[in-house]
Image (cartoon, rainbow, N blue to C red):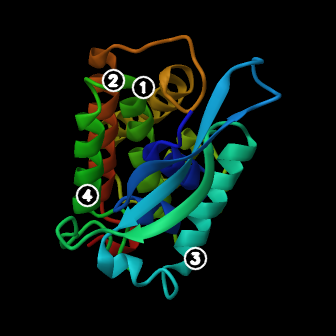
Amino acid sequence: MYPDKELVRSWLIETNRLDGARLLEEAVFEFQWAETFFDDHRPAGVEHSCYELEIFLPVPLFQRLQDDLFRAKEQVDDALGELKQAETVDHVEGVIWRAQSPSASCPSKSIAWGDSPGSSDDLTRAWEKAKARIESDPKGAITAARTLLELQLKSLLSGSEVEFSPKTSQTDLYRASLSLLAPFSSDKDCHDAYRNLGSTIAHTITHVRRIEGDAHASEFQPTAEKARFIVNVAGALALLLGTVPKKDAEG
């Protein structure tokens, strides 16, 4: 399995390496043939090709890889190594970072380093990218939906005193985020309804992604209609959470 960019971003977010995940938001993955070989661990007599992964970045970001974005680059390199070691991805023997040609580069707003990674512009772009995969890649769209919601939740918790780890479930991240936010409504029953619906959505997206997403080998193939549902509710919840003020901002 080749390392799809959204699969790598999903792993980075799950393991709390948000700088690397944000860097890949701007990246383009391309593969170049390296060699063909026989693998003793695979069926005899079958040739296998391996490739080099080229990661292209807009020139302004590429120029910063040895400076303030060095840590983000290291996170991506480490994640690719971990996925390969776990045999989640294969066929890749090396990673080369390159600058996009000037004609391919364009000013980007999706990485404003130092700003909140959960801004509405960031989320809207991630949501649109997930939507774009629905028809051609329902599994990938479901994984992207889970990723964008998790990024929003971890962005809300980042810098707070709330502790979480890569093993913290998305449902628990949601509950922890609510502890920092003002109520959804001044009416208690209405607030409880929003809170419970959000919890159900967070749990459902995690479960569906585990069974029907592309992060793990699965015999289940979701339909585009199912993927569209998951993508839409994930994006809607992420954007809603971004509009609720934090408790210390009330009044």
Residue 211 position (above or below residue 93) = above
**Quadrant of the image occupied by residue 234:** top left
How much space separates mark 4 and mark 3, taking CA atoms?
A: 30 Å
Mark yes or no: residue 106 visible: yes
Callout 1: helix, strand or loop? helix
Residue wearing tag 3? 71
2 lies left or right of 134: right
**Residue at the spot x=68%, y=45% of the render?**
84
The kind of residue on which mark 2 rests is: Ala
The kind of residue on which mark 4 rests is: Thr
Residue wearing tag 4? 243
- Residue 242: mark: none
Which of the two residues, 6 or 188, is positioned nearer the viewer here?
A: 6
Q: Earlier in the sequence, mark 2 or mark 4?
A: 2
Q: Name the mark nearer the viewer: 4 or 3.
A: 3
Q: Name the mark nearer the viewer: 1 or 2.
A: 1
Residue wearing tag 1? 139
The kind of residue on which mark 3 rests is: Arg
Q: Where does the image place residue 136, in percent across and percent down from the top left?
A: 29, 25
Q: Where does the image place residue 72, in percent across and percent down from the top left?
A: 53, 71
**Residue at the spot x=51%, y=53% of the render?**
53
- Residue 227: mark: 2
Q: Earlier in the sequence, mark 1 or mark 4?
A: 1
Residue 114 position (above or below residue 141) = below
Whether residues under marks 1 and 2 lie with C-beta atoms below 8 angstroms apart, the answer is yes
Q: Name the mark nearer the viewer: 1 or 4.
A: 1
**Quadrant of the image occupied by residue 35:** top right
Callout 3: helix, strand or loop? helix
Q: Where does the image place residue 38, in percent across and percent down from the top left?
A: 73, 31
Q: Earlier in the sequence, mark 1 or mark 3?
A: 3
Whether residues under marks 1 and 3 lie with C-beta atoms below 8 angstroms apart, the answer is no
